[in-house]
Amino acid sequence: MKKWFVAMMAALACLIVGCNVEDTAILCGREWNVNLDVIADTASEFEMNDPLIVQFRYGTNFDFAMLKTAFYEGTLANRGPEIWNHEVAVTEKQGVYTLQGKSRHGGLMTARELCRKKEPGPVVIEVSGDGKVLMTKQILLIKNR
């Protein structure tokens, strides 16, 4: 009876760990792992000529129809004007959305191109679903070394 109880508790623990839900997050990075569909190199500080990929992970499937990603001048505490935004239709079968672009010069868009900034400085990325803000993140663009 004791072995049966231990086996059942182990199975229950595996089930709970297997159902663990990922937290909502905005990930920004320089490298994209195509096989795993994830950002391989996450960061919050980018040189202007670094490639930039932005990924929004919701944790569960999206429970809204429209996803908007907006870029703003400034910091989280002192957000300035909107630089640009991108709105896309999503489905409840999705739980992750990745924003990346192809540069005119080949390869992925640089931080300068994706953020549409001419000068280094802080940028706020805001993700909202059906008009409700879901998450914000601040990144810093720095001069090229």
Image (cartoon, grey):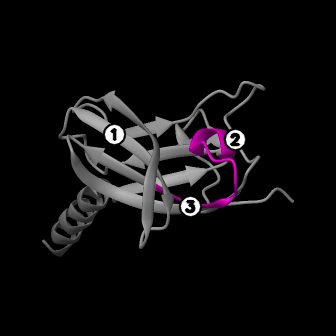
Q: Are marks 1 and 2 in contact (CB under 8 Å)?
A: no
For residue 141, which quarter of the picture?
bottom right
The N terminus, quarter of image: bottom left
Span highlighted in magenta in the image: 112-124
Tag 2 secondary structure: loop
Q: For mark 3, what is the residue?
A: 139
> Residue placed at 25% from the left, 33% from the top?
66
Q: Between 131 and 65, which is closer to the camera in this rendering? A: 131
Q: Are marks 2 and 3 in contact (CB under 8 Å)?
A: no
Between the C-alphas of marks 2 and 3, the distance is 14 Å
Q: Between 42 and 15, which is closer to the camera in this rendering? A: 42
Crowd rating for badge 2 (residues with CA inside 10 Å; few <14, some 14–19, many 20+): many
Q: Between 142 and 42, which is closer to the camera in this rendering? A: 142
Q: Is residue 122 magenta?
A: yes
> Residue placed at 38% from the left, 48% from the top?
57
Tag 3 secondary structure: strand
Between the C-alphas of marks 1 and 3, the distance is 18 Å
User: x, y (%) of residue 117?
Assistant: 63, 47
Q: For mark 1, what is the residue?
A: 68
Tag 1 secondary structure: strand
Q: Is residue 76 above or below residue 47?
A: below
User: x, y (%) of residue 144?
Assistant: 82, 56
Q: Residue furthest front?
A: 81
Q: Is residue 112 above or below residue 20?
A: above
For residue 65, which quarter of the picture?
top left
User: x, y (%) of residue 73?
Assistant: 51, 57
Q: Looking at the image, tell me whether mark 1 or mark 3 is earlier in sequence order.
A: 1
Q: For mark 2, what is the residue?
A: 110
Q: Between 51 and 95, which is closer to the camera in this rendering? A: 51
